[in-house]
Structures are given as structure tokens and as C-alpha cells.
Amino acid sequence: MRSSTARARFALSLVALSSLVLGCGGAPPKQSRTSRPKTTLRPTANPKPAAAIPGPALLPSYVIARLDNENAAPYVARRGEDMLVFYDARGRLFTRLCGPDGKPRTAEPIDIGPAAAEIPVATVEAVGDGYLAAWVEGMKSNAAVKLLSLDATGAARGAPVTIAQSADEVSWVQIVAGPSSALVVWEVPRDDHSDVLAAPVTPGKTPSPAVVLAHDALGWDLVATDRGAAIASVVAGAGGAQNQAEQGRVGRVLYADVDFTGKVSAPVVVNPEATAQNDIIVGRAGGRTLIGWTDVRNIDSSVYVAAVEPGGKIVTPPKRATTPVGEQALVSLVSGGGAGKRALLAWEDLLRSPRDGRLIHLATMDPDGKLGAERTTLVFSASGPPDIIADGDGFAALTLAPASSEPGPLPKDAPIWPTFVRFGPDLQVRAAEPVRAEAFATSDGIPYLTRGLSCQAGACTTLAANEGSPATLAAVGLPVRQSPWRAPASRDPDDTPPRPLGVTALYDGEHLARVAATERPSGGSLAAWVTYFIEGNNDGAGGKPARKDDPLATVGVRPVSAAGVPGKTQILSRRALSIGGVAIASAPGGKTEESALVWAARDKNEAQVQIAKLGPEGDKLAQKPLTTIARKPSKDGVPSEVSDVAVAYAPPSDPGKSTDDGFIVAWVDTRDGNAEIYAARVDRTLRKVVQDRRITEAPGDSTEVQIAVRGKETFLVWSDARGNPDEGAGDIHVVRLDTRTLQKVGPETRLYTSPGHSRSPTIALAGDRVVVAWIEEAAHDAKPEETEAGVRIAILDERGTLAGSSRLVRGEEQSAVTSVALACGPSKCRGVLTSALRDSMILDAFELSPGAPPGPLKALVTLTGGANADVSPSFAGREGTSLFFGDDAIGGTGRVRFMTIGWP
């Protein structure tokens, strides 16, 4: 079958209020084989006057016909200042000639002949001095493509002719109109691919034999040219169609020309790699054909375009159309009107979708496939694409969006109505209103569905129908006029920082347990992750793998250059423990740029901390077990495990002379029963120079340790349940250690006492001050207006004592915060937090100057993984410009994403 996006490119607009899953660009539904009720096709008076409908003035409208029901699809064609409507009702085919605003020019519709019991799809186009109508008739197990010539009034010039018959289904038909002849194009689906055929026709003459435009196409689209049409198709690459279908229906992109005599050029390979999805769309700008598709050559899908001249010369090879911001999807590519020098590209950034509905980005595109500077966003509260067409030197769109004529914020219960938008050449909104007309007064003027957006000579109309049998069909004018209605589209302002400058996926596979990152001294970053794996799903005893070499969680590392280009992925372990997490830190100086990576793994079925030394590209230079103790369950049966690893670079004791630098590692260990914090130190060869040292000795579990090294002092921060060991509700504690010996140089200090659980601390240095942030969960009995839930931030002075009161950053709309990350420079900190808001996970940014209140939250993206995603954000570097985090893809796999952030 042809892709739904490409199909919608040619279909009449369909917006149904009762079911928002129908996109307003969707193909009309097939009509039922059941007998049709008898209806009167004569226009009648409107059911009640317009004055009875509340709200702003209604749009101008004219009743055209009575359809059998709301699913009986009308079709429309424009020719100069005439608009012809073609439809079937009561077993007959009809046309009605209207003016540019939809006002009928004739007193009655014209009966042009009998209609088949089933007409799944049809079309009508202006050709020569009249029109051509084509449709598909279902006949038992066969299908026929019929063609009828009409004069300028819409009257039949003879009997319909059959131009093709097929023992298979014919799922699509369209007409490519020329000055005096045309191509009738149809599609025959065959399992997961389609054949596309065309027949040249000239009104009054016998149609020529059909020619094949595309064979075994996974997706296709075509556009009219001066000489005929240009067709682009997606075909399977090496391995065959079935193999490509299993890989997500992707393939190569081919291009061909066909003239009005039916001559088809040899196909030209536009995209040789099998990376194009089947949502291919073509448009025209400046005499060239623009081809767009969603491409999967990178982990995150993105929108690609290419430009081809007549004859098949590729003037712009395939390229990414927009800046990557996570997963993207092509929505539409519309040929420009007027002089035709620009097309319109519509796409979606799935990471930047709102919580309710969708935001579709619009930008003009020149003949080279380059986007214009102007950007506009269109709200669309349905699946599929909105209907977008050329409107003189601008464009027009029909969408589903929340409607309101009141000033101020949009009400949460605003109704979702079909709404039109007309854009100027700079994509500024010229006009926008809900589609409200007298013919639908029984439903406050709102039709059940709208179809057939069309524009000509400054006039735009849409066809609309009410629900029921019979259904009223009306042409609704879409004028440019002053209106109090809120427009569902607007020109994008200059986005104020902080804002995402780009989002790139580094890993796609199993779901993620933890993500960590570090800045390389020479520039760029190293990102590390450990996947999520639940032990105990096999026959092994005690919840452990049955064999010592069974795979567990995976630890991976990938470099990113200073220019943001990802390098090769390195897999460090497939025997990791998800609860161990992963941590990474870089060491400056030395002959070779080195980093330390720490994780937990099963070694001979015992949990041990592992440490590896990495080169500048994440390649493993050395690896050792950091812990090697024999692990046995406690007398109470508590297994001896390790978790929550952390690592930091420890500078030399005497920066001018000593070379005793290395790394400090901390982790949570249950070797003594409950969970306690341990630490050790290694030199740059990974030799342990300070043995495992137990830091905490208190009832209750100590978890989620983090490290910050400030010269000769090292700070550990963690969540500690010693104040409530039975329930496990923790508070955040901090301790100072001597960097060289790891001996305590001060008492353990509780930073804040809260009624709820405090967890997930993060620590950073702002000059000599230590900044600690953590998540406060709401107490189970707290009232919403009294809750302390959010991110709490505390500042420690140069002596390591609490400086002033802590600050609370609440999630958006007081939503539950799920993760936090912090990066600090000498005088300013930058942070991100994620919060679960209804069914979505929002990633917000904020700034903080120690001693001052935190700045407001600014939403960066809405994650695709949903409200249960384990995000684990991690900054690489103190500037906070490089953020790494985990997310789930639209398809459900886990992904590590790299975001560059532009700050004020």
C-alpha cells in the first residue's frame, strides 16, 4: 500500500470531530455496499438563522447538496473562477458548478449517470476547456478504473470509458492535468509494495495503453510538471522487499519523468542507500522537483530532501533538511503557488511535541532544497498530516486545534474544532478562524467533517458536511478578515535561551539504567551508559545467572568530538549490573589523554566494582577489578552486592612536583549487611593506592553516592536513611575527606531534614563553593499546596559548611521531579531536571548563581519515552552546554541522546 503520508498529499481533506484519529489529509473512507437511503439533492433553507448561534460571526457558506451520509466523499476541481464539485448520491453521479467562493452557479446539480455500488476512491481535475473525472469501481473480486469527460458546466460529454481493469484491488486514482491532455494514474497494492500505472488521455479520444511508472514500490508520490509528471518511489535495496519490510519498510529513492504521451524515462537513483522510509513526498519549486522523505541512516530519524532537474539531473544530493532535534518526521512538502519559486516543507520534531496535540513546523524551501529563515508552527490535534496547499504567493492550511475567542491563556477545556489558517509569503498568519457555518447550526455551526481545501485567485473554500443520513454538504468560504479567534499557528519568535541547539542519538537498543559523561581535556566528550537488565529470569539459583558467562547488562562508551560528531561505539562489558550504574571521569595532562570508567559486574557470579582506563576515543587501555572480596549473604540473608558507583579525578598532592594523581571511586556496598558508602583510590595505572574504606557506619541504608574533588579535599554526598531506617526515607548527607588518604576531615553532616524521601543527589564546584542538588519527594500525607517536592539546592562555603538556606525548584505545574543534573562554573550553575507531567516527561533547564534564588524553568524538550522513562541526565563539562541523557524512542527501544544547549 502507498504510504499514508503520501496518500494524504493527494487526498481531499477530512477532519472528523467525533474521531480525532482521522487526519484532515486522510483519504476518504470507502462507501458501504449496503443500500443507500433516498435523499433530496435540492438545496433547502438553513435549519435556523445565524443569529441563534453564539459567538463571533459565521463564515460565508452555501449548501451544495444532500449526501447519503457524511462518509460520501465529494471531490472538487478549480478552473479559473469556477469550482466544480463531483459526488455520488442515491446510486447516481452528480456535478455542481460553483463560483470561486462556493456559491452554486446552477439551480440544480447535474446528473451525469449511474454510480456503481462501490466507489472507494475518485478524483476530478480541470483539463482543456472542461474537466475529467476518474473513479475506481469495485466489481466482485475485480476493480475497474473509469473515466468520464465533462464540459465546462460539468455535464457529461458521453459515456464513461474503462481505461483499466484489474483482478487485484486498485487503491488509488488521480489525474495529472495538462493544458489539453492528462495522465490518469492508479495504484495496485501487492502485499507490502505497490505497482503504479498511468494511461495518457485526451478528452474526446480513446485512452492510450497504460504504462508502468513504478514497480514494487514501498512508497511513491508524483507531482505535475510542464511536460507531464515527475515520480519518486522508494524501492527495496539489496536483500529484497521482504528483508526491507522487516527492517521497517525502508529503501532506496528513485526518480523518473513521464510525459503526457506516456513515455517514461529510465529511473535515476537519488538515494542509493536503503535508508528512506516509505513516506516520500514530491513538490515543485523554480522548475525543479523537490523530493522529501523521513530517513533512518542515523539512529534518530530525520527529514531529508533532494532536488532534481527535468531529465533526472540531481542538483542537490540527499541532505538533512533541518537541524536534528531528536527524532523527526516528514509531514508534507507542498508546491508553491504564484510564481512557484518556493515550496513549503512541514515536519515534526518529536522531542519538542507539546503534551497535548502536535506542533508542526513550517518553512519555505528554495529550488536547491534550502530552507528559508522564517519558521512558523501549526497546532494539529490529530494523527496524520493537516491539509496544506498553495494560496497565491502564500499557503493555506486546514487543521484541528483548540478553539477560543477569549483573551488570555487557552482554556484547558477548549473544544477541538476544524480551523483554517492562511499564511502570507513570509508565513505570517493572514487569517485564521474555526470552520463555522449556518448549515451546521444544530451543532453551534461546527460541521462534523471538512474536506477539499482549495484556493484560486485569492479565494479559498473547504467542503463541509454534518453527521447523519442524509448529510448536508456545504461550501464554506475562508476569507481574510479580522477575527477574535485565536490562531492555531504563529511565526516562531527568536527562541530565548536556554534552548536546544541540536539533539543526536548515540545509542539505540536495550532500555537504559544509567548515563554518564565527561569532558575530554582536548575538547569533546565521552558518554557512557549501562543498560537495564533484570536478573533472576532464568534457572540460576539465588536470582543469579545459571552460567558465569551469561550476558547481563551492557556497558558502552562513545566519543563525541568538539564539533559534535559522534565517534565509534566501544562495548566495555556485557556482564554488568544495572544497579551498579556507570561513572566516568577524565584526567588532564599526561602523555596520553586518559579517562576512568567505573561500573559493577558479576565476576565468577559475585558482584564486584570494575574500573577501566580509556583512551581519547573511548578505547580500553586497561581494566582491573576494584573490589575482589568473597561475597556471601549476611546472617539475615541480605545478598552482598555493590551499586551506585561514582568516580572523580584526584589531582596530584603537589601540582608543581608530585605525579601521584589518579582517581577516587566511591560506591554502595552491602558486604556488612545494610548498604554503606565505600571509597578507594587508584593511580593512573589503576593500581589501588588507598584500599577500600568504609565511610558510613549508621543504621539504615546509604545510597546514591556522588563525588566532588576540591584540591586536597574531597566531598562525598549521598542519601542516608539513618533517621528513618525502618521506612527507608532518606535525607541528604555530606562528608569531607582528605583527597590523598580518604580519611575524614570533618563529621558527616545532614544538609536538610524533610518529611519526604530525599534522593538522587548531584554535586558540583562553583569556585571554592560546593553546590549540592537533590530531589525531594512529596510526603505521603502532604497537601499539594504544602508539599516540598522538587529539586532542593544547597550551597557549601569554602569551609564545607552550609551557607544560608537551601532553595527549592519545583517542577512545572508542581509535577513530580524524576531526575536532576548540575554543572557549575566559577560563578554560575546550570541545571536540568525532568518531571512527569500527566503522560509526558518534560526536560527543563534553569540557572543558579550561588547565594541567589534559582532562575525560572525553561522547557527544552518533551521526551518521547513517556512519564516512566529513566532519563539519567549528565553534563559533560562545567559550562553545561553538552548534556547526555537516556530516553525511549518512538518505536520503544532505549536511546542515549546528546543535546547541545545554548545558554544566555
Image: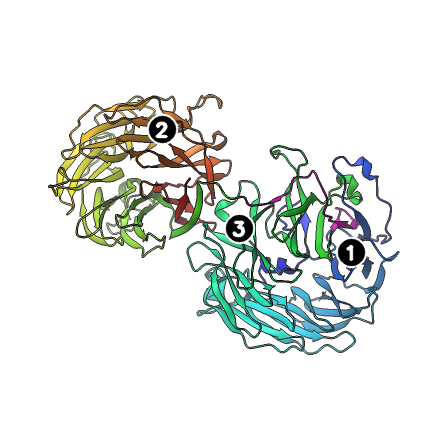
Q: Quadrant of residue 642?
A: top left
Range of magenta residues? 463-492
Q: Residue at x 30, y 41 (%)?
A: 581
* Residue 486 painted magenta: yes
Is residue 640 something that shows in the picture? no
Q: Sequence-wise, which precedes: disc 2 or disc 3?
A: 3
The residue beneath circle 2 is: 793
Instruction: Tell me residue 201's x, y (percent).
Output: 72, 74
Q: CA distance from mark 1 to mark 2?
A: 64 Å
Q: Secondary structure at mark 3?
A: strand
Instruction: Tell me residue 864's x, y (percent).
Output: 47, 45
* Label 2 Cα neighbours within 10 Å, binned few <14 / some 14-19 / many ≥20: many
Q: Amino acid at mark 3?
A: Glu
Residue furthest to the right: 107
Q: Amino acid at mark 1?
A: Pro
Q: Nearer the viewer, residue 544 or 209?
A: 209
* Label 3 Cα neighbours within 10 Å, binned few <14 / some 14-19 / many ≥20: many
Instruction: Tell me residue 444's x, y (percent).
Output: 75, 38
Quadrant location, the N terminus: bottom right
Instruction: Tell me residue 845's x, y (percent).
Output: 42, 37
Could you tell whether 863 is left or right of 510 in the image?
right
Where is 839 relative to 321, above or below?
above
Q: Nearer the viewer, residue 612 or 39?
A: 612
Q: Amino acid at mark 2?
A: Ile
The residue beneath circle 3 is: 348
* Colour mapping: rainbow
Quadrant location, the C terminus: top left
